Amino acid sequence: MHRAAPAQHPFRLRTPQGPGRALAARLLGLLLAALLAFGGAAPPALAAEAAELTALELTRDEDGLYINFAVDVELSHAVEDALAKGVPLFFLAEAQVFRDRWYWRDRRVADAVRVWRVVYQPLTTSYRVTFGGLTQTYASRAEAIAAISRGTRWKIAEPGQIEEGRHYVEFSYRLDTTLLPRPMQIGVGGQPEWQLSLKRTVRLN
């Protein structure tokens, strides 16, 4: 009388034998190594994190409302390369003043904007910064970036624009890619290396 073979579990994986077993073990090892490589790799740094607000202060007197700010800017490799090739870069700072309204959306009472244009001059190996019709030349990129990343006693509202009530200021700073040459706007659209920006809100006491 022959003994019946034990039933196989329908969901049990059968381990390959012989050469097949060695091949399966090797493939499993490669798969685990790939998962560890992708899972443990650090994500690339985004250019949007390369701008840090180091100072932001509001002052108010009889002449109006002023803001002082300083931004620590670090350009990505792609932006540095474009600047070195003579592509003009535009940096924009904006300060919007709002008044609280409990019954409706907060009212914007003032809006001030500053735009800087930075371009590299290969013949003189210098950097030219244009702001409000004024142009100044700097010997190094670091000096040029320092000039466009801070503002002192920037007037953002007239005395009559600050009414009774509570107010706050929304400050933003960014690399404005909408002012780049049009062919470049298509190429850099959505690329993280070109997304350099920050935004903060501060209350007016």
Image (cartoon, helix red, strand yellow):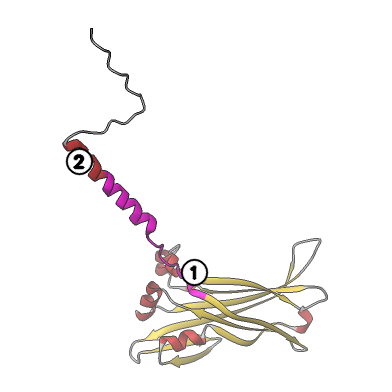
Left or right: where 136 falls relative to 201: left
Residue drawn at the location 21% of the way across and 37% of the way down: 21
Tell whether position 108 is magenta: no
Q: Which mark is residue 22?
A: 2
Observer able to see residue 34 = yes
Left or right: where 52 falls relative to 10: right
Look at mark 1 in the image and give the residue it sits on. Answer: 48
Task: Check the image and report above or below for 108 versus 103.
Answer: below
Residue drawn at the location 38% of the way across and 55% of the way down: 39
Sort mark 1 into few (<14), some (14-19) or many (20+) by Cα contacts within 10 Å. some
The alpha-carbon separation of the residues under discs 1 and 2 comes to 48 Å
Tell me the magenta residue range: 28-51
Q: Say which of 189 and 195 sits in front.
A: 195
N-terminal-most mark, 1 or 2: 2
Q: Secondary structure at mark 1?
A: helix
* Quarter of image, res 38: bottom left
Query: Which is the main secondary structure of the residues drawn in magenta?
Result: helix
x then y, percent, for residue 138: 44, 91
The three-letter code of the residue at mark 1 reads: Ala
Q: Residue furthest top?
A: 1
Observer able to see residue 65 = no
**Figure quadrant of the C terminus:** bottom right
x then y, percent, for residue 72: 51, 80
Proximity of marks 1 and 2: CB atoms separated by less than 8 Å: no
The three-letter code of the residue at mark 2 reads: Ala
